[in-house]
Image (tube, grey):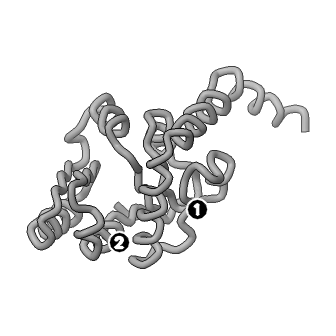
């Protein structure tokens, strides 16, 4: 789409076939050009890449995918928080996410904030995310963060604080 940067991530993956051998890479909510590129990168590298178009997966299927994932890569030109990133964190995937205006409120050492959307930067972030995923304490930290900050009571407190200002 107009804010997503899946093509940059796929180009990074294209240049990491040895490092990503044995992993299954899943791309969801992809437009036609991303679907085509995913197929091409898979054929060129021998990596297992499964790509799904917009609406091809139910919300439950996406959550199940996050639960099976080591890392979640979300690259966007948007400045807001990614709901998908929060869902992935809740399901145990380590976030590799564009450094948005409020990204650092959700993780510090248990995820990777990407400051530059370039192939070398994404490759480094994927490597760092996979390294973080080796230690299950990072996934637990992220789950606890989501539980604390995205709970009904936590959201209510934050919302009410806007009225006190």
Residue 91: horizontal and vertical position, in percent?
44, 34
* Badge 1 density bin: few <14, some 14–19, many ≥20, Cα 10 Å: many
The location of residue 129, given as percent across then percent down, is 46, 57
Residue 6 in which image quadrant: bottom left
Report the residue at 67% width, 29% height from top: 148
Q: Residues within 10 Å of mark 2 (few under 14, many from 20)?
A: some
User: Which mark identifies residue 99?
Assistant: 1
Cα separation between marks 2 and 1? 15 Å
* The residue positioned farthest toward the front in the image shown: 135
Horizontal side of residue 127 vs 149, given as left or right: left
Q: In which quadrant will I find the C terminus?
A: top right
The picture quadrant where one finds residue 44 is: bottom left
* Image coords of residue 20 (percent x, y): 27, 62
The earlier-in-sequence mark between 2 and 1 is: 2
Q: Is residue 14 left or right of residue 81?
A: left
- Residue at image location 76% in from the left, 32% down from the top: 158
Q: Nearer the viewer, residue 123 or 150?
A: 123
Looking at the picture, tell me which residue is in the foreground, 73 or 78.
Answer: 73
Q: Looking at the image, which residue is at 48% across and 62% down?
A: 128
Badge 1 marks a residue whose secondary structure is loop
Quarter-of-image position of residue 119: bottom left
Of residue 61 and residue 125, the one placed in the foreground of this image is 125
Q: Please, what secondary structure does the residue beneath circle 2 have?
A: helix
Residue linked to disc 2? 8
Q: What residue is at 23 percent from the left and 69 percent from the top?
A: 17
Q: Quarter holding the N terminus?
A: bottom left
């Amino acid at each position: 789409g107009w804010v997503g940067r899946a093509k940059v991530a796929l180009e990074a993956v294209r240049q990491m076939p040895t490092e990503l051998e044995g992993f299954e890479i899943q791309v969801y909510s992809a437009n036609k050009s991303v679907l085509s590129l995913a197929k091409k990168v898979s054929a060129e590298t021998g990596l297992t890449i499964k790509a799904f178009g917009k609406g091809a997966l139910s919300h439950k299927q996406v959550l199940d995918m996050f639960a099976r994932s080591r890392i979640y890569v979300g690259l966007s030109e948007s400045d807001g928080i990614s709901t998908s990133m929060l869902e992935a964190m809740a399901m145990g995937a380590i976030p590799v996410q564009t450094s948005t205006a409020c990204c650092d409120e959700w993780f510090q050492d248990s995820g990777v904030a990407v400051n530059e959307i370039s192939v070398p930067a994404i490759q480094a972030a994927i490597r760092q995310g996979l390294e973080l995923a080796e230690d299950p304490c990072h996934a637990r930290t992220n789950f606890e963060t989501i539980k604390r900050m995205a709970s009904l009571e936590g959201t209510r407190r934050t919302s009410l604080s806007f009225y006190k200002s």
